[in-house]
Amino acid sequence: MNPTTRQPAMRRVLPLLLSLSALFLPAQARSIFQPPNPLLLSSTELDDLEFVKTYIEANANNTFREPSGVLSHPYLVPSGPYDQCWDWDSVFTGTALLSLGSAPYLAGSMKNFFEATGPTGDVTICLDPSDPNPSCSSDPSDNPAVAAHAKPLLIQGALIAARYTGDYSQFLEYKDKMELLLDYWDRERKDEETNLYVWHDQMESGADNLVTSPCPSSRSGCWVEKDCGNSLSSADLMTELYREHKAFAAFLQEWGDQGASDKIDKHLQIAESIRDAMNTHLWNKDKGSYIAYNVTSRTPILNDVYLLAFPLFGDDVCSTAQAQAVASRIFMDDMMGEWGVRSTSSNDPSYNNDNLITPYSNWQGPVWANANAIIGYGLLDNGYKEKALDLAKRTIAVMAEDLRNSGTWHECWDSEGGGGGLAAEGFLSWNTLGYRLVDDIVSGKNPFKI
Ligand SMILES: *[C@@H]1O[C@H](CO)[C@@H](O)[C@H](O)[C@H]1NC(C)=O
Ligand SMILES: *[C@@H]1O[C@H](CO)[C@@H](O)[C@H](O)[C@H]1NC(C)=O
């Protein structure tokens, strides 16, 4: 491997010129002078892709862990400074590395979370964050008011592992746990007036300091539990939960147990009501994007962040018009940089690319691989294959650039600079999606589809 220096301007402009010129050729000439397939990669892009894939192949199993301590099943870790089993990291990494042997680790990570799910749907295996093998969705000491629990992604993670192995029955014993997890959100986190569900804080959402919260979590001095806690509804939670109910319905279908059809209907109905609530309260027609909402103050939260396009990832959540609006909105300069989607718009007063990990990772501007992948697969599913590929190429480019600059990966990247890695050196989590993202998009396959 000998990746060449990038030539970003050339790479974009040349294919565009060629494809534009094709528009003005008569049909006959067009068949002779075939424009390059817009889905083809330039030789620099192919070099970058091979570089990234080679790195992932050589390092994939650094994310694999055998059962240990409270974790009685094999699991995945995000590597770098993180040696724990994390909820959404596992789902993305496990899916990324299926062809490299991750299926038992993905399945095991989800089983560890199910086994640690208590009777009220809380997930209690992360009681001691200093334990080298805890399983954290968030540090419980962050949230004294609520028990630790996982993001609503575990059932879909399990479903992906089950589909890949053809073994759905390995999860049958966790059926009750799955229901407890889903019931938790309905019982504790649903705003009855709007049917919107809420995050406790931004640490819980995983986008630690996202600007949709003026005070992101108890790690900030401004936090006041009674005002801030459980006030934020946003499109990530709604989309994840929508998918989670559909994934549970898919499991029930596969298991085919007694009384399944009533339950399947119930969960599909809940999914629909989640979609409807999101499209009623989190869709902003004037902006042509999804927004967030404060259920305490009953006011919309209008900051532009990567979540404005997140519902594309929800299979059939967006109407054709909504998909079209967010697909073009996310490609506007304030949201789309050279390296992909900025976590927060460059027009936001809080926008920055500071290199942070303590007290929280930075979602106020940097590019995150999982956000790029979620939106990339979402664009693909909604019929925007070229845009999806464009985004995937930017993602591969920044991954290659970080590797060239630093020899390793970081958890996010400067959305302005020259592909600079920020924080968590050695991170090897959802960025492993670089192994399959381009191939999936070219072949029109979304491995996350429920
Ligand atoms: C990872 O793969 C390498 C090469 O196949 C092997 O030598 C090593 O033992 C593996 N490590 C783990 C943790 O499985
Ligand atoms: C919601 O509104 C309350 C009351 O005005 C405020 O204290 C809290 O910080 C807001 N939360 C978010 C996420 O905007």
Image (cartoon, helix red, strand yellow):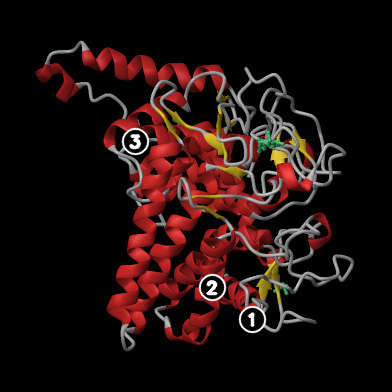
Task: Report the Cα–Cα distance between label 3 and label 2.
Answer: 29 Å
User: Please, which residue is most extreme toward the left here?
Assistant: 28
Q: Earlier in the sequence, mark 1 or mark 2?
A: 2
On the image, numbered disc 3 is attached to which residue?
Answer: 384
Whether residues under marks 1 and 2 lie with C-beta atoms below 8 angstroms apart, the answer is no
Q: Nearer the viewer, residue 314 or 23?
A: 314
Which label was assigned to residue 115? Answer: 1
Report the side of 348 relative to 225 (left or right).
Answer: left
Q: Give me the residue at 42% from left, 70% from top.
A: 248
The residue sitting at 31% across, 20% down in the picture is 19
Quadrant hosting ligand 1: bottom right
Marks 1/2: CA–CA distance? 18 Å
The relative height of residue 107 versus residue 204 in the rendered view (above or below) is: below
Q: As rendered, which of 4 and 12 lies closer to the eye? A: 12
Looking at the image, tell me whether mark 3 or mark 1 is earlier in sequence order.
1
Labelled disc at residue 103: 2
The answer to whether mark 3 and mark 1 are in CB contact below 8 A is no
Whether 22 is drawn above or below 412: the answer is: above
The amino acid on which the numbered mark 1 sits, given as a three-letter code, is Glu
Q: Residues within 10 Å of mark 1 (few under 14, many from 20)?
A: some
Residue ID at (83%, 36%): 222
